[in-house]
Image (cartoon, rainbow, N blue to C red):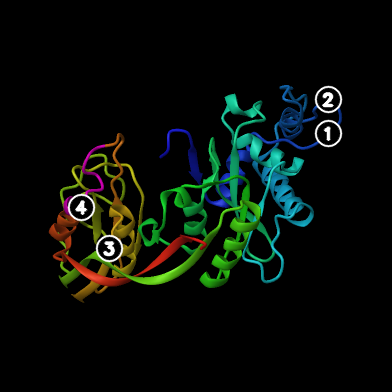
Amino acid sequence: MRANSIFLVVASYLSIFIGGMNARVLAEDQPADDLTAVNQHAATGTKVEPVGKRASPTESRLAFELLLAEMASKHGYGLEQGQRVRRIAPPFPEARVTYCNPALPLEMKANPNVTVGVWFVWDGEKLRQRGMTIGAAYRLKDIIQYGIKINPHEIEGPKEFLEHHLEGDWVIRSVVEEEHFLQELENILQKEFDLPVRLAFAKRVREVYVAKGKYHFASVTRNENDAGPDKTGNVTNDRIEIYGSERSSLGGGASGELKDFLSWVESWINVSIVDEVSEPPAKEITWHSNQPRLTISGSHNSELVLKNITDQTGITFTKDLRVVRRLLIEPLE
């Protein structure tokens, strides 16, 4: 995580619910309830206390749903028919300021100069929040990843392009065609940021790991603080631990087929994996990525991580050169 940026990715309803616990609705000079109090604080920077009862979670969710609907219908946050992506540049409408204010750290609420960018998804009817960045705008590689669900190592280009900060809010259609999304994003970059780039997929020869062998599960000794099913091995799905130098109870996880698991590992080690496993698991598997509490050398080391996976699955990983697809970010000539 970058030191100058707090990056939050939350499900829309969770975000609305958490924010709503401190949200308020508009009223006259004297705030009648909690929703009114925060709205006045967002507009004036002066903290005021409500005289009425605290809004219920249901009322808060409804208030935030109404703010999102207003942003979509009146302030350009709803995409037009056939549109895949849109950037909303600051200054932002009052509805958006009110929506975001409860999510900000207390010391940032009264600072009008703090950079806040929000990533929304539009499904054709409703607007939903998917993430927020505080302290620094989203980077170009972030927007590409969110738009077409691509791993970071599959995007190649000069660092000044990949890391280029794109100030504003971003609305991305929930389902997009890669080519059309990239065309629209390319136009935004050229016209709104004066960034002369071309975005296109191409085939390139790159060093990858090739997964081979027959899958057979062997569980590792569970840590006392491990989350999940009991430690006796009596679990419905095989649970594979993704880790490098040491284990941790922190981190994420999921369930799925082998291809889904290998894609998750790709993101963890930032290297492509080609699936040539002769006998994959007969059922879905579960995995847990072990995120250390502190930055520990080796947590994402590819050799360590893949050895640990081999010990648990019997699948071997060898380096090879293969033709793979890459998204190229190139300067216009």
Residue at image point 30% right, 34% down: 294
Q: Which residue is mark 4?
A: 305
- Of 33 and 97, nearer the camera is 97
Of residue 131 and residue 55, the one placed in the foreground of this image is 131
Amino acid type at image mark 3: Asn
Q: Earlier in the sequence, mark 3 or mark 1?
A: 1
Residue placed furthest toward the front: 333
**Tag 1–tag 4 contact (CB < 8 Å):** no
Point out the frontmost of discs 3 and 1. 1
Residue pointed to by mark 3:
237
Q: Nearer the viewer, mark 4 or mark 3?
A: 4
**Kind of element beneath mark 4:** helix
How far, Cα to Cα, is label 3 from label 2? Answer: 56 Å
The amino acid type of the residue labelled 2 equals Gln
Element marked by disc 2:
loop
| Foreground: disc 3 or disc 2 | 2
Residue beneath the point at 40% across and 71% down: 202
Q: For the stretch drawn in magenta, what is the main secondary structure?
A: loop
Residues tagged 3 and 1 counted as in contact (Cβ below 8 A): no
Residue at image mark 1: 27
Residue neighbourhood size for the residue with mark 3, other residues' Cα within 10 Å, grouped as few (<14), some (14–19), many (≥20): some
Q: Quick one: label 1 or label 4, which is nearer the N terminus?
A: 1
Q: Quadrant of the N terminus?
A: top left
Picture disc at residue 30: 2
Do the residues under discs 4 and 2 have CB atoms within 8 angstroms? no
Residue 160 in the image: state x and y as whole percent: 46, 48
